[in-house]
Image: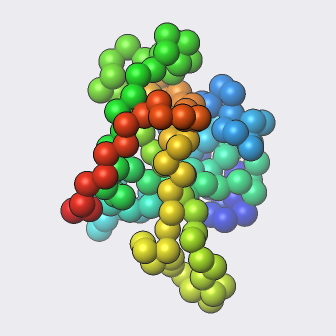
Amino acid sequence: MNSTRLGQLDVDEGTTIAFPRGVPGFEDSTKWKLFYEEDDGGKQKAGVVYLMQSLTDPDVTLPVADPSLFGINYEFVLSDSEIAELKLDDPNDLAVLVVLNQKNKVPQASTSVPMDNLGANLSAPLLINAKNRVGMQKIFLGPEAKIEYRAAR
């Protein structure tokens, strides 16, 4: 695959994440791959922004992060249909990510976005069954979720 943002990519089908209904705004993008920075030892760096690349549309790459990076902890209940959609047997297999956006434009010459210029869509986290590699975006329309703000570490 040749991603507009990430260039030529070799993707192992066993590492893709299926979003059966797509992601709102990108309903046709049902297969995704999560990319992350690695440290010198080849392990995933903690506390970084990940890039979720659509494998259906090379022009669609979403910056995402663990909500704890922003001091956020979600507490919510999944419906039976959401549990079935995620094929979730063990709640410990559930990963939660938030889609990021820039608060203010950064000059094109800049290669990075300062953390204080990043915002997160807290009302629509991505839920991923890490074991079965199935995901969905849960949209909160009201006070369905209790969001706790904690000081960032």
Residue at the (68%, 44%) spot, across then down: 55
Quarter-of-image position of residue 106: bottom right
- Horizontally, residue 150 falls left or right of residue 69, namely left
Residue at the (49%, 15%) spot, across then down: 79
Give above or below for 72 relative to 143: below
| Residue 128 visible within the image | no
The picture places residue 62, in percent across and down from the top left corner, at 61, 54
- Horizontally, residue 50 falls left or right of residue 101, namely left
- Horizontally, residue 13 falls left or right of residue 23, namely left
Quarter-of-image position of residue 38: bottom left
Residue at the (45%, 20%) spot, across then down: 78
Query: Which residue sits furthest front?
Result: 143
Q: Is the C terminus in the top left, top right, bottom left or bottom right quadrant? A: bottom left
The picture places residue 16, in percent across and down from the top left corner, at 55, 37
Give above or below for 137 relative to 111: above
Give above or below for 37 relative to 95: below
Depth order, front residue of 51/65: 65
The picture places residue 60, in percent across and down from the top left corner, at 71, 54
Quarter-of-image position of residue 2: bottom right
Depth order, front residue of 31/142: 142
User: How many numbered marks have been drawn onto this rendered protein structure?
Assistant: 0
Instruction: Identify the colour scheme used.
Output: rainbow
Residue at the (42%, 34%) spot, across then down: 145
Depth order, front residue of 25/54: 25
The picture places residue 96, in percent across and down from the top left corner, at 42, 39
Give above or below for 110 relative to 146: below
| Residue 37 visible within the image | yes
